[in-house]
Every structure is written in structure tokens, then in C-alpha cells.
Amino acid sequence: MNNKIKAYLLLLLSALMWGSSFPIIKLGLNKGLSPIGFLGFRLFISVLIVIPFLYKEINFKILKDKKMIFLGLTNAGGFLFQYFGQKYTSSNTAAVISNLLVIFVAILSFVILKESMNLKKGIGVILSFVGLGIISNLSFGSLSANKGVLIMLISPLMWAFFVILSKDISSGESFRQYLFPIYFYTFVFIFPFAVLDGFKFSIIGISLSVYLAIFCTVVPYLFFLSGLKFVGATTASIITSFQIFFSVIISYLFLGETLSLNFTIGLFLVFTSIYLVESS
């Protein structure tokens, strides 16, 4: 098996793992787990797991870098709004909205970094929001009906700021040394709220948190970074966008979430928009 095929497999596996996170989070919330406590315990386990994986690359001097603090803050914001948003919307819709990260990065790159916004990107940006509107039946005349969607939208926006901030350090394998400080500060920002919110130490709560920490946080990032060694960033991003489809399948099998015509049309438009933006 050549390196490129291995890279494709690793990227698909990371997409599968990330895709499974949405139904798993929804399952935990449906079982009565509080969003912040649930997230806090996941991140606590993630930090513990990262240490043996990356202990040779942990550089404590990097912890003093202010950029790591801001990356931890934006990452924490992305997680928080995802968990809160998923209380009020389906895991399928949450998966689609989270993947609008690509669109928000394109917009912020244009506004903040003055990168070009060509016709292909522009069409992609427009299609993404049309698709989202179709999926969620978004009506600004009734914000309460779309509470989950509106909360979830802040999540990819926060992660888009994370991407913009990390552009100068996110070059493949070198990014591994930043994983510990980023997750450390992410945990630091969420931990006080998680303590106040509390966590139900039930079998299902602990099991879901451990699964999310290992298979939806640490391992897929390592797989993604390994795949980037042999596949271009654009190809890697498009492959990992298939997490939406994995989420849809898992949500159907384990949560009984079905696909409406609106969702199917909207999903097609959003995925097309991601492809247009990434490929340009």
C-alpha cells in the first residue's frame, strides 16, 4: 500500500470519527448530560491522553505564547457553542453547520487577511447559506424556532478565527507540538464553568466522554496530520468534509434521525459550496 492510499484511508477514518461526534454528543444530551459538564470532562480526558501521545514534543515554553491562549479561547468557544446548539437541533443539522467552517474561513480570510474572493468562492459562500436556510427553514421572524441553528452558527465562526490565528503554525507535522498547549488552554477556559455546571458520573456519561476524547478529539487530529504529509491540504479538507455523510448515517442508525427533502437538497448545496471554496 503506497503512502497516498494510506493518507486517503487515514483522512477517511478521521472524517468517520469526527462525523460520529455529532450523534454521540446528541445522545449524551438526550440522556440528560449538561452541555458544559459533558464537554469539560471530554476535554479533561483529552488533555490526559495527549500527554503520552506527544510527550516528546511537548514544549512548555510554547505555553507562554499568547497566541496559544487565544487559540485555546477560540477553540473553547467553538466547542461550547456546538454543545449548546446541539441541545436544540438535530445532530445532522449540527454536522452541516459545523462544516460551514470552510465558508467562514473564506469570508474571514477575505476580510482580515485580504485574500482574494474569486467568483468560484463567492458562489460557494452564497450556496452555503442558501443550503443552510433550506435545511433549517430559517426564519428571522421567529428566532426562537431557530435557536439551535443560530447558536450553532457561532461555533464554526469561532473555529474560523482559530484557523486564521493558526495559519502560520498549521503546516502538517509541525502542528503536533501545538496540540497540547491548545487543548490545555481550551480545557482551562472551560473547566471553571464545567465545575459549576457539574457532570453526572454515570456509566453512559463517562463512556461517551471517553469515546469523544479518544476517537473524536485526539486520534482523528493525529490521523489528519499524518494524512497531510502525503496529500494536499485542499484534498484533505474535502475528504474530511465527508464527516457530514458519516454523521447522517450514524444518526439514522442510532438516533432514528431521518432525511427530509429539504435537508437532502440543503445538504447537496452545502457540500457543493464546500467543494467550490476548497477547490478554489
Image (cartoon, rainbow, N blue to C red):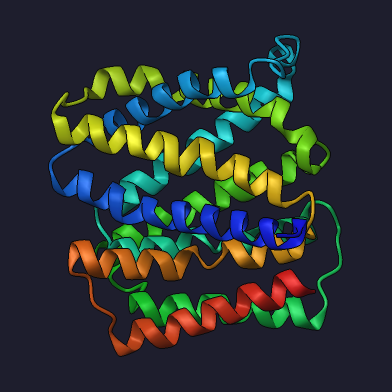
| Residue at screen point 70% across, 9% down | 60
**Could you say which is closer to the camera, residue 136 or residue 112?**
136
- The quadrant the C terminus occupies is bottom right
User: From this viewpoint, which residue is outermost toward the front?
Assistant: 1
**Could you say which is closer to the camera, residue 160 or residue 179?**
179
| Residue at screen point 75% across, 61% down | 4
Determine which quarter of the picture holds residue 149. bottom left
| Residue at screen point 24% across, 34% down | 207
**Could you say which is closer to the camera, residue 74 or residue 236?**
236
Q: Is residue 11 visible?
A: yes
User: Eyeballing the image, is 2 above or below 56?
Assistant: below
Left or right of 145 in this view: 230: right
Residue 195 percent across, percent down from the top left: 29, 17
Determine which quarter of the picture holds residue 94. bottom left
**Could you say which is closer to the camera, residue 244 or residue 218?**
218
User: Eyeballing the image, is 120 above or below 176?
Assistant: below
Q: Is residue 125 visible?
A: no
Left or right of 72 in this view: 7: right
Left or right of 238 in this view: 44: left
Residue 59 percent across, percent down from the top left: 73, 13
User: Eyeballing the image, is 270 above or below 93?
Assistant: below
Residue 223 percent across, percent down from the top left: 61, 45
- The quadrant the N terminus occupies is bottom right
| Residue at screen point 16% across, 49% down | 30
